[in-house]
Image (tube, grey):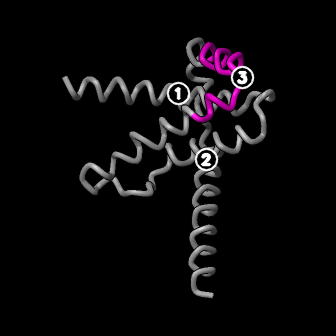
Amino acid sequence: MCMDTLKRSAQKLKKEINVLAVVYRDPRTPWYARLFIAVILAYSLSPIDLIPDFIPVLGYLDDLILVPLGIYLVIKLIPDEIFTEAHQVVAARPEDAGISGWWFAVLIVLFWIFVAFFLIKAIWIQKN
């Protein structure tokens, strides 16, 4: 029973990630929401996590909390009609809603460069 619940949650999360990809491509989406969506997509689809998955419980906790929280915040930043239309696109043509290979790779690389830059900057500031 617990495994079925997790599978359903994972499928719902995957659908929401596809909806975010459609919302990102919508020209009516504000720039700040696009930036936030890019971070959420990069983090959720990246094989690198802030807390590695091999750490019991905590490894999956970041995925179960951070990604849905990010999706919730994006929903608050975007007009309802954009999200409604994105859900309709994903329901009608799920194959068109995903993220293409090159865009996914660029997104992940940029995300981790961004994270590394701020970590290095924070360490550098503390030493000086």
For marks 2 and 3, give the one nearer the viewer: 3
Query: Is residue 44 shown left or right of residue 115?
Result: left
Q: Tell me the magenta residue range.
A: 73-89
Instruction: Name the residue carrying label 1.
Output: 16
| Residue drawn at the location 64% of the way across and 57% of the way down | 110
In the image, residue 60 lies in the stretch drawn in magenta: no
Q: Quadrant of the C terminus?
A: bottom right
Label ID, residue 39: 2
Up-down: is 72 above or below 46?
A: above
Up-down: is 24 above or below 118?
A: above
**Residue 88: image x %, image y %?**
62, 13
In three-dimensional space, the C-alpha distance between marks 2 and 3, rounded to whole angstroms, equals 19 Å
Q: Pick whichever of labels 2 and 3 is earlier in the sequence.
A: 2
Mark 1 surroundings: few (<14), some (14-19) or many (≥20) residues within 10 A: some
Image quadrant where residue 3 sits: top left
Going by the numbered disc 1, the residue's amino acid type is Glu
- Label 2 residue SS: helix
Going by the numbered disc 2, the residue's amino acid type is Val
Label ID, residue 79: 3
**Residue 35: image x %, image y %?**
70, 44
In three-dimensional space, the C-alpha distance between marks 1 and 3, rounded to whole angstroms, equals 16 Å
Q: Pick whichever of labels 1 and 3 is earlier in the sequence.
A: 1
Going by the numbered disc 3, the residue's amino acid type is Pro
In three-dimensional space, the C-alpha distance between marks 2 and 1, rounded to whole angstroms, equals 14 Å
**Residue 56: image x %, image y %?**
24, 53
